[in-house]
Image (tube, grey):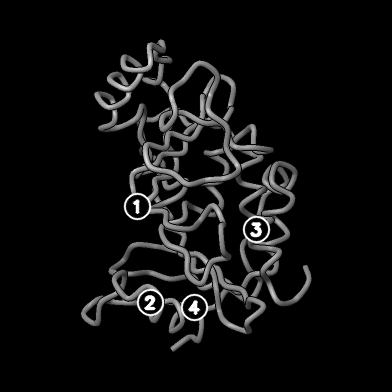
C-alpha cells in the first residue's frame, strides 16, 4: 500500500471502506499543467509540481491524491475528485481551469492551522457547487429585516466552498470577487460587507478575487511543507 494513501485513510477513514475497489499508481512525473494554468496560479503550480501524486480510482471514480511532507514529518495533502464537465453552473474561466486540470478538493488531511481547507465539506468541486445561498434565504431576509438593511441580489453568486457549519464561500461571476456568507463564524480576517448585517455577508481581508483565494490557500500549504519549495 502506498504510504500517502495509508496516511490519508488513517486521517480520513470515512472515504474509503474495506469493501471498496481501489486502483492506484504513482505518477512519477506528476500532473502536467498547461501554460494558462501556470500563469494564472503560479503559487499553486509550484505547490503541485512538488507534490507526490497518486492516480487513484475508488470504485472506478478517478481522483488525484496530492501529498507533501509537513514540518512534523507527516504526510499531508488533498484528495481531488476528477469529474466530467457536466455542471449547468456558469463557472468563471479560472474556476473551470482549476477543475479541468486538477479537479476539486473533496477532502484534505493534516492541513495547516487556520487554512482555507479547514472544516470544509468541499472546495471548488463542480458537482457540489451551487448558486445562491442554498437554504439560508429565509434567515438572510429576516436578518436584513431586523437590522433594516436591504438584501443584496445573491441569486447568481456561485458557492464553491462549504464549511461543516454551513458557512459558504462564493464569488460573483461578473466581477470574480469573493464573498463569505457566515451565519456562524469566529473569523478574525473578515469585514462585514457594507450595509449588510453581522453574520451574513463578509469580505475576506487581502483576498478580493477567486484567484487570490486559490493562491492564498496554496500559500498556506506551501508554508507548512517541510522542504522549502
Q: Earlier in the sequence, mark 1 or mark 4?
A: 4
Q: Which residue is mark 1?
A: 164
Q: Say which quadrant the C terminus sits in.
A: bottom right
Q: Secondary structure at mark 2?
A: strand
Foreground label between 2 and 1: 1
Of residue 40 and residue 170, the one placed in the foreground of this image is 170
Q: Earlier in the sequence, mark 3 or mark 4?
A: 4
**Local crowd size for mark 4, using a 10 Å CA cut-off: few (<14), some (14–19), many (≥20):** few
Q: Which residue is mark 3?
A: 220
Q: CA distance from mark 3 to mark 4?
A: 27 Å
Q: Are marks 3 and 4 in contact (CB under 8 Å)?
A: no
Q: Are marks 3 and 2 in contact (CB under 8 Å)?
A: no
Q: Which mark is residue 23?
A: 2
- Is 134 placed above or below 81 here? above
- Is 9 placed above or below 189 here? below
Of residue 24 and residue 1, the one placed in the foreground of this image is 1
Foreground label between 3 and 2: 3
Q: Secondary structure at mark 4?
A: strand
Q: Earlier in the sequence, mark 2 or mark 1?
A: 2
Location of residue 96 in the rendering, given as x and y in whole percent from the top left corner = 52, 39
Location of residue 54 in the rendering, given as x and y in whole percent from the top left corner = 51, 73
Q: Are marks 2 and 4 in contact (CB under 8 Å)?
A: yes
Please name the residue shown 69% across and 63% down the image: 222
Q: Which residue is mark 4?
A: 25
Amino acid at each position: 500500500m502506498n504510504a500517502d494513501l495509508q496516511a490519508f485513510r488513517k486521517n480520513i477513514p470515512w472515504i474509503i471502506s474495506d469493501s471498496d475497489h481501489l486502483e492506484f499508481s504513482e505518477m512519477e512525473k506528476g500532473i502536467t499543467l498547461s501554460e494558462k494554468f501556470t500563469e494564472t496560479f503560479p503559487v499553486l503550480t509550484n505547490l503541485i509540481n512538488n507534490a507526490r501524486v497518486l492516480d487513484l480510482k475508488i470504485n472506478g471514480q478517478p481522483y488525484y491524491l496530492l501529498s507533501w511532507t509537513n514540518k512534523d514529518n507527516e504526510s499531508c495533502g488533498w484528495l481531488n475528485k476528477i469529474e466530467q464537465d457536466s455542471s449547468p453552473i456558469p463557472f468563471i474561466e479560472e474556476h473551470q481551469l482549476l477543475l479541468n486540470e486538477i479537479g476539486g478538493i473533496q477532502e484534505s488531511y493534516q492541513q495547516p492551522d487556520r487554512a482555507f481547507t479547514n472544516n470544509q465539506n468541499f472546495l471548488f468541486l463542480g458537482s457540489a457547487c451551487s448558486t445562491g445561498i442554498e437554504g439560508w434565504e429565509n434567515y438572510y431576509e429576516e436578518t436584513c429585516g431586523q437590522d433594516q438593511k436591504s438584501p443584496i441580489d445573491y441569486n447568481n453568486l456561485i458557492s464553491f466552498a462549504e464549511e461543516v457549519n454551513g458557512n459558504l464561500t462564493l464569488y460573483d461571476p461578473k466581477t470574480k470577487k469573493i464573498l463569505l456568507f457566515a451565519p456562524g463564524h469566529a473569523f478574525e480576517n473578515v469585514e462585514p460587507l457594507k450595509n449588510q448585517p453581522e453574520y451574513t455577508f463578509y469580505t475576506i481581508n487581502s483576498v478580493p478575487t477567486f484567484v487570490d483565494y486559490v493562491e492564498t490557500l496554496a500559500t498556506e500549504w506551501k508554508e507548512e511543507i517541510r522542504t522549502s519549495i
